[in-house]
Amino acid sequence: MIWNPKAECMSSEEREEMQLKRLKKVVKKAYENVPYYKELFDSAGITPQDIQTLKDIEKIPFTTKTEMRKTYPFGLFAVPEDEIVEIHSTSGTTGKPTVSGYTEKDLDIWGEIVARALSMAGATKKDRIQNSYGYGLFTGGLGIHHGAKKLGATLIPISAGNTKRQLEIMKDFESTILTCTPSYAAYLAEALEKQGLSGDDISLKAGIFGAEMWTEELRTNIEKSLKISATNIYGLTEIMGPGVAHECQEKNGLHLQEDHFYPEIINPQTGETLEDGEKGELVLTTLTREGMPIIRFRTKDITTLRRGECACGRTTVRMDRITGRSDDMMKIRGVIVFPSQIEKALLSIDGILPQYQIIATRPKTMDELEIKVEVSESLFSDEIKHIENMQKNIAKAVHDTIGLRVNVSIVQPGTIPRSEGKAVRVIDKRDFS
Ligand code: ZN
């Protein structure tokens, strides 16, 4: 079902006209109400009047996470504080957190875009949504919450963690939709199997997974084990939260909600704007947000935008699944490596569980890459010869993908720490000082 056909299926002319109108408005509002944006425009020698076409957005300098941190906590709010009704924040694991403020209308828009996402995943008001994203300052839990309410579905706000209880509720309440990180979905499937149960013993029909990078291989794995249709949700706290883009049942790119967010793809090295179909860093501008308008935010997420009507009938631009973040990018012996490439290689091999860790070290002068991976119980208890063969196969698959020799350790199922939120896939022990 298409939640909002008017917004999701409009012609490109109609959409561009709407975007331009909204862009002019948001730029003026940010310039007049947020000192950070006034300074940014002044430093570039431009005023809101210089934005007369959508292309003119390129005149505006980018906003980065580092710049946003300088305004911590509330420096980017564009309305008086009494109009802000909810605040979220990033975890701040890599520095000061970035804060996001919402007015009542912003929350309504957030609910709207998540309702569109839930509909794309196949949810209707008849569904029971088990929301296993963490509730709190993290946008995952409450973002899905606002959308499920808008959709009119039955929401089960269980939040993250307590796997035993998750499975108990899933069975007893007959949850039909699961929302959490893909790594946690894989873990829930594993825990279900440990109880001697399978996807046939639960009522789930679909899963909405995001907040971390994942691959088609992991999707296949989760879909098989939980017997569901798994779709990919994208969002970020700085811009709004989950729901900025989501996959329809075609599973061929994520529909980006262009009436509320204006996307661009840039060359991350030069900042130059790239054409549709070219791969680069996603830059987003909020078009309707009141509490905290954000202009040209560099997401650091690497993707490609694709235009043209989708078989589902929606006309919104589609972005490819995120294949890397400039943050997660590792340089190993001079070669750029993304964890997603390694996941792809690993899960292409039968018997490998979606639980792995990538450990980078530099014992002397050369980088070493170790991959710890779990295999199924039956494989693990197999003869040592088979394990050695498996190690070789994994090393070869990874070598074929990234072009680097790696050390593979096969570990007992259950030994790699599970995460109830975002999984820790990469441990970089190299000393860069
Ligand atoms: Zn579609």
Image: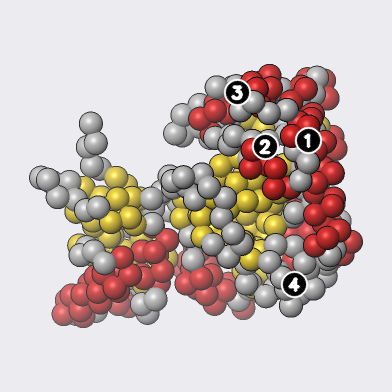
Give the amino acid at mark 4. Glu
Q: Is residue 399 visible?
A: yes
Q: Position of residue 38 (x, y in %)?
A: 69, 22
Mark 3 touches mark 1? (CB < 8 Å): no
In the picture, measured across the screen, residue 75 lies left or right of residue 420, that is right
Write down the residue under mark 1.
26
Q: Quadrant of the N terminus?
A: bottom right
Local SS, label 4: loop
Give the amino acid at mark 2. Ile
Labels 3, 1: front one = 3
Determine the residue located farthest toward the right in the rendered image. 6
Write down the residue under mark 2.
295
Q: CA distance from mark 4 to mark 3?
A: 40 Å
Q: Is mark 2 within 8 Å of ligand 1?
A: no
User: Upstream in the sequence, badge 4 or badge 1?
Assistant: 1
Q: Quadrant of the C terminus?
A: top left
Mark 3 touches mark 2? (CB < 8 Å): no
Query: Image point 80% across, 46% down: which residue?
Result: 20
Please tell me in which quadrant of the rendered image residue 245 appears.
bottom right
Give the amino acid at mark 3. Ser
Up the image or down, 1 lies above or below 424; here it is: below
Q: Is mark 1 within 8 Å of ligand 1?
A: no
Query: Image point 51% across, 70% down: which residue?
Result: 216
Local SS, label 2: loop
Mark 4 touches mark 2? (CB < 8 Å): no
Determine which of the numbered discs, if any, sits on residue 309 in the image. 4
Q: CA distance from mark 2 to mark 1?
A: 8 Å
Determine which of the numbered discs, if any, sits on residue 43 in the image. 3
Q: CA distance from mark 4 to mark 1?
A: 28 Å
Q: Position of residue 154 (x, y in %)?
A: 81, 57
Labels 3, 2: front one = 3
